[in-house]
Amino acid sequence: MSKGVERSIFYFDEKGPVNTEKSLEIARARAREANIGTIVVASSTGETALKLHQIAGNEVKIIAVTYNAGSRFQAEVEKFNKNRDALLEKGIMVVRGLHALSGPEKGISEKYKTTFLPLNIVADTLRMFSQGVKVCVEIVIMAAEHGFVTTDEDVVVVGGSGHGADTALVMKPVFAADMFKAKIKALLCMPG
């Protein structure tokens, strides 16, 4: 007889920021239940990370991953810069760097007018589940590359579809060079 654990997945009716609070509550609940000490959260302006802190307080380590400084989303970069001190004051760790699933390939794509690049294939494959799943995989790699998580711990990862959050996973972090060893251990919520 097979052994295992039966769990539920919450499927949102639509994608986007309307699901932020519920996604963060689901992430916190799983972290508590599984005794996971870290939540990695995509936060383009810092607001989602601050909301997570309101919900979870200091019971978990919060790592906010944002757009790189040279991103085309300059309004979000500037807003994050304004929220940075508030994040740090609350003990939220901040990751800003090249996106793990695009980075320099964006420049190659634009210069040579091609999208047939290895990381684009990986990103598009993950988007078959949802944009948030792609974001979660990307930001957990970025957090590992910054040394904020180790590759031998489980973490809860929260991402979304632009602004806010609508996806949460439990993952085993990996470094970029080991991207294909990434393990999504549980899907907690996502747009249906």
Image: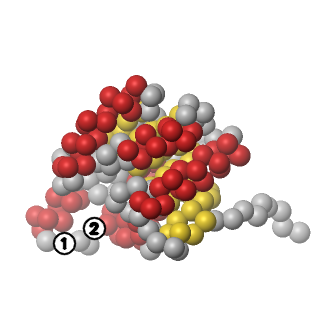
Q: Which residue is located at x 60 percent, y 33 percent?
A: 59
Q: Is residue 46 left or right of residue 111?
A: right
Residue 111, above or below 45: below
Quarter location, residue 17: bottom left
Instruction: Determine the secondary structure under disc 2.
Output: loop
Residue 93 lies left or right of residue 107; in this view the side is: right
Cα separation, mark 2 vs mark 1, equals: 8 Å
Nearest the camera: 159 or 14? 14
Mark 1: few/some/many CA within 10 Å (<14, 14-19, 20+)? few
Q: Residue at x 40, y 25 (%)?
A: 89
**What residue would you read off at disc 1?**
114
How is this picture coloured?
Answer: secondary structure
Image point (45%, 28%), residue name = 90
Q: Position of 172 compared to 122: left or right?
A: right
Tell me the amino acid under the disc marked 2.
Leu
- Identify the image quadrant of the N terminus: bottom right
Q: Quadrant of residue 117?
A: bottom left
Picture quadrant of residue 124: bottom left
- Circle 2/circle 1 CB separation < 8 Å: yes
* Percent of width and height locating residue 71: 21, 51
Q: Residue at x 21, y 53 (%)?
A: 73
Q: What's the mark number on residue 139?
A: none
The answer to which of 104 and 57 lies nearer the viewer is 57
Does dot 1 land on a helix, a strand or a loop? loop
Tell me if mark 2 has few (under 14), some (14-19) or many (20+) residues whose alpha carbon lies within 10 angstroms of its own: few
Residue 87 seen in the current view: yes
**Residue occupied by mark 2:** 117
